[in-house]
Image (cartoon, grey):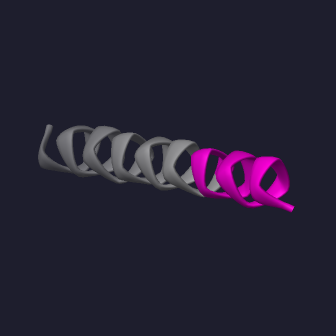
Amino acid sequence: MVLLLTTRYLLRSLLRDQEQVSMHWTVLSSRS
């Protein structure tokens, strides 16, 4: 049970990081 919650939390944080990275790249590409 705890393992499942931890896995979901890690996946969620990873997805959030990927979204932030893609947003950052979009801003960089639009600026140049």
Q: Is residue 30 left or right of residue 6?
A: right
Residue 30 covered by magenta stretch = yes
Q: Quadrant of the C terminus?
A: bottom right
Residue drawn at (54%, 42%) of the image: 19
Question: Percent x, y for residue 14?
Answer: 48, 53
Question: Percent x, y for residue 13?
Answer: 35, 51
Residue drawn at (74%, 61%) of the image: 28
Q: Which residues are magenta?
A: 22-32
Residue drawn at (27%, 39%) of the image: 4
Question: Percent x, y for residue 9?
Answer: 26, 46
Residue drawn at (73%, 46%) of the image: 26
Q: How many marks?
A: 0
Instruction: Pick whichever, 19 or 23, lies toward us.
Output: 23
Instruction: Pick whichever, 19 or 10, lies toward us.
Output: 19
Instruction: Pick whichever, 26 or 9, lies toward us.
Output: 26
Q: Is residue 3 left or right of residue 10?
A: left
Residue 16 covered by magenta stretch = no
